[in-house]
Image (spheres, rainbow, N blue to C red):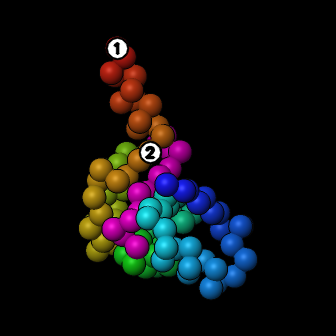
């Protein structure tokens, strides 16, 4: 299986972006700046999330928000998103620390 990692800066044009998104099996979507700004969802982020939802996992390095917080924020914006596909670095660190305790 081959993997392709693309950042917004690495996409040359809209057609190339569309081809990559339509052909990819999964999308890691950063919460901060891509879906929301200051934990407030923005319209374009919600539109993208809704369109590709089946292939998206939301990720963030935030240590101040939990998966259930994002889940609630999205629900309030009218988007149902599986909580098990919200992966936050801070939350994962706490879970792992509790396992090691």
* Place of residue 59 in the rendered image (x, y in percent of width and height, measured from the top left): 47, 52
Between residue 6 and residue 71, name the one nearer to us. Answer: 6
Q: Quadrant of residue 92?
A: top left
Residues tagged 2 and 1 counted as in contact (Cβ below 8 A)? no
Judged left or right of residue 5, residue 94 is left
What are the residue bounds of the magenta stretch?
52-64
Asked if the magenta segment contains residue 81, the reply would be: no
Quadrant where the C terminus lies?
A: top left
Residue 70 appearing in the image: yes
Farthest residue, direction bottom: 15
Total number of numbered discs in the rendering: 2
Farthest residue, direction top: 101
Looking at the rendered structure, the secondary structure element under dot 2 is strand
Looking at the rendered structure, the secondary structure element under dot 1 is loop
Please give the residue where the numbered disc 1 appears in the rendered image. 101
Between residue 80 and residue 77, name the one nearer to us. Answer: 80
* Place of residue 95 in the rendered image (x, y in percent of width and height, measured from the top left): 36, 30
Judged left or right of residue 5, residue 23 is left
Picture layout, residue 44 above or below residue 98: below
Residue 42 appearing in the image: no
Mark 2 and mark 1 lie on one chain; the one further toward the N terminus is 2
Label 1 neighbourhood size at 10 Å, few (<14), some (14-19), many (20+)?
Answer: few
* Place of residue 7 in the rendered image (x, y in percent of width and height, measured from the top left): 64, 63
Label 2 neighbourhood size at 10 Å, few (<14), some (14-19), many (20+)?
Answer: many
Residue at 49%, 73% in the rendered image = 23
User: Label 2, label 1: how many angstroms apart (C-alpha)?
Assistant: 20 Å
Residue at 56%, 73% in the rendered image = 20
Judged left or right of residue 41, residue 70 is left
Please give the residue where the numbered disc 2 appears in the rendered image. 88
């Amino acid at each position: 299986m081959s993997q392709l990692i693309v950042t917004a800066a690495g996409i040359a044009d809209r057609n190339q972006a569309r081809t990559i998104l339509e052909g990819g099996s999964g999308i890691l979507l950063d919460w901060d700046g891509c879906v929301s700004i200051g934990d407030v969802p923005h319209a374009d982020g919600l539109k993208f999330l809704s369109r590709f939802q089946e292939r998206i996992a939301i990720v963030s390095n935030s240590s101040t928000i939990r998966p259930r917080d994002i889940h609630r924020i999205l629900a309030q914006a009218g988007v149902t998103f599986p909580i098990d596909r919200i992966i936050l670095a801070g939350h994962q660190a706490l879970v792992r620390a509790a396992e090691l305790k």
